[in-house]
Amino acid sequence: PKILLLGAPGAGKGTQSSNILEHYDVEHVTTGDALRANKDMETEHGTPREYMEAGELVPDPLVNEIVKAALEDAGGFVLDGYPRNLSQAEYLSEITDLDLVALLDVSKEELVDRLTGRRMDPETGDIYHTEFNMPDDEEIRGRLVQRDDDTEETVRERLRVFDENTQPVIDHYEESGELVRIDGEQTPEEVWSDLDAAIEDVA
Ligand code: AP5
Ligand code: ZN
């Protein structure tokens, strides 16, 4: 299936994308990871790093290119982190259709706690949280790192940018009747159960 996973920073898009990949034959297309892997790439708009560390959106032309190339190679996919503004949503509608548009719905207070407590395993890319989900393995615990943009100041700017630019995208899919809203404040397992059911409906 062709799945669009929407949600604010920290809503659980990465966490639930891993579940989707385990259960369905789809590619993970994520602009955040793609940009992090190419942070220092020089482009005519500068490097992705400058924007990401400030919590701002990377310019559309660069991000649109990444998504176009990734979708060309993919049959089914889960798209995570894109579109983040109406112009990207317009571009997306020109390059693919979608089977499911799902929103992970989480309140603002919860998002700040999730992002400032997030830790990543640099070797596997697995996502953890200092309070909600730590690995038992001491070796893994010892190598966890914090993402550069998970400082409190950058988190607040990312949430502001989400309200200003990405909320209108959600409103757009809501108005077109495509949006499936999922309560993202449940446990990760409960969120997955609801999301899986929504995918089953369209797969
Ligand atoms: P991106 O990487 O897309 O970041 P984001 O959208 O801010 O989302 P996150 O990855 O922070 O959160 P997530 O929803 O994946 O949550 P996670 O599962 O990790 O983008 C980063 C930057 O790149 C942007 O700021 C921008 O600069 C640039 N960029 C990317 N795409 C772009 C685009 N299209 N256009 C322009 N610029 C772009 O979970 C978060 C935490 O919560 C974890 O610790 C996790 O363990 C925990 N958690 C997850 N689920 C639960 C649960 N149910 N209960 C409790 N804790 C939970
Ligand atoms: Zn993510």
Image (cartoon, rainbow, N blue to C red):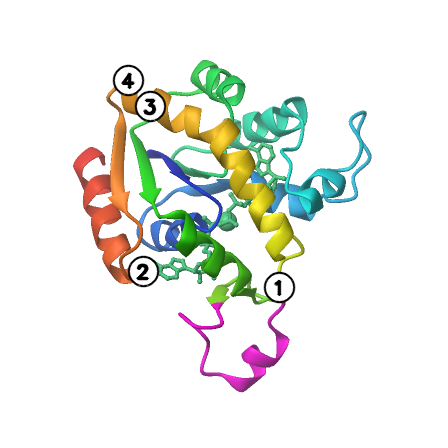
Label 1, label 3: how many angstroms apart (C-alpha)? Answer: 32 Å
* Number of residues whose C-alpha sits closer than 10 Å to that of mark 3, classed few (under 14), some (14–19) or many (20 or more): some
Residue at (79, 43) in percent of width and height: 40
Secondary structure of the residue carrying numbered label 1? loop
Which residue is label 4 attached to? 176
Q: Earlier in the sequence, mark 1 or mark 4?
A: 1
Q: Is residue 86 magenta?
A: no
Residue 33 drawn at (x, y percent): 59, 46
Query: Mark 3 — residue?
Result: 173
Which of the two discs, 1 and 3, labels the residue nearer the N terminus? 1
Identity of the residue drawn at 59% across and 25% down: 64
Disc 2 to disc 1, C-alpha distance = 20 Å
- Say which label, 2 or 3, has the lower sequence index: 3
Left or right: residue 118 versus residue 48 is left
Label 1 with label 3: CB-CB less than 8 Å: no
Q: Residue beneath label 1, please?
A: 146
Given the image, on which type of amino acid does mark 1 rest?
Answer: Gln
